[in-house]
């Protein structure tokens, strides 16, 4: 697994944790924004057509 893939995975995991924390504490708007950022970062984890 490449360093770039690991770093994107960490970003997605941190966004998921921060989003859930925001929703739990009542900041639904911030939670939605952080979740959207996490989903945008998750696009970078999709497999590519070129071999690594």
Image (cartoon, rainbow, N blue to C red):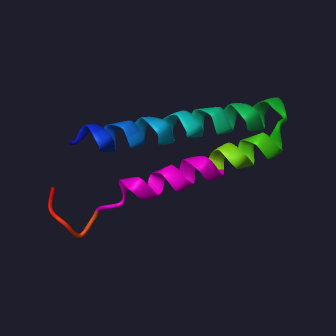
Q: Which residues are magenta?
A: 36-47
Is 49 on the left-hand or right-hand side of 25? left
Is 35 on the left-hand or right-hand side of 29? left
Q: Position of residue 27 (x, y in %)?
A: 82, 37
Q: Is residue 38 above or below residue 20?
A: below
Quarter containing the C terminus: bottom left
Q: Is residue 40 above or below residue 4?
A: below
Is 51 on the left-hand or right-hand side of 5? left
Asked whether 15 or 21 is in front, the reply is 15
For this orientation, the residue located farthest to the bottom is 49
Is 4 on the left-hand or right-hand side of 10? left
Q: Position of residue 46 (x, y in %)?
A: 36, 60
Confirm whether the magenta stretch covers residue 16: no
Q: Residue at (73%, 48%) from the top-left corner?
A: 32
Q: Residue at (64%, 52%) from the top-left corner?
A: 36
Q: Position of residue 41 (x, y in %)?
A: 49, 50
Quarter of image, res 29:
top right
Confirm whether the magenta stretch covers residue 42: yes
Q: Residue at (57%, 38%) from the top-left corner?
A: 15
Q: Is residue 21 above or below residue 36?
A: above
């Amino acid at each position: 697994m490449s360093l770039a893939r690991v770093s994107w995975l960490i970003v997605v995991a941190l966004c998921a944790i921060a989003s859930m924390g925001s929703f739990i504490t009542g900041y639904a708007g911030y939670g939605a924004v952080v979740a959207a950022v996490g989903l945008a970062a998750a696009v970078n984890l999709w497999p590519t057509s070129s071999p690594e």
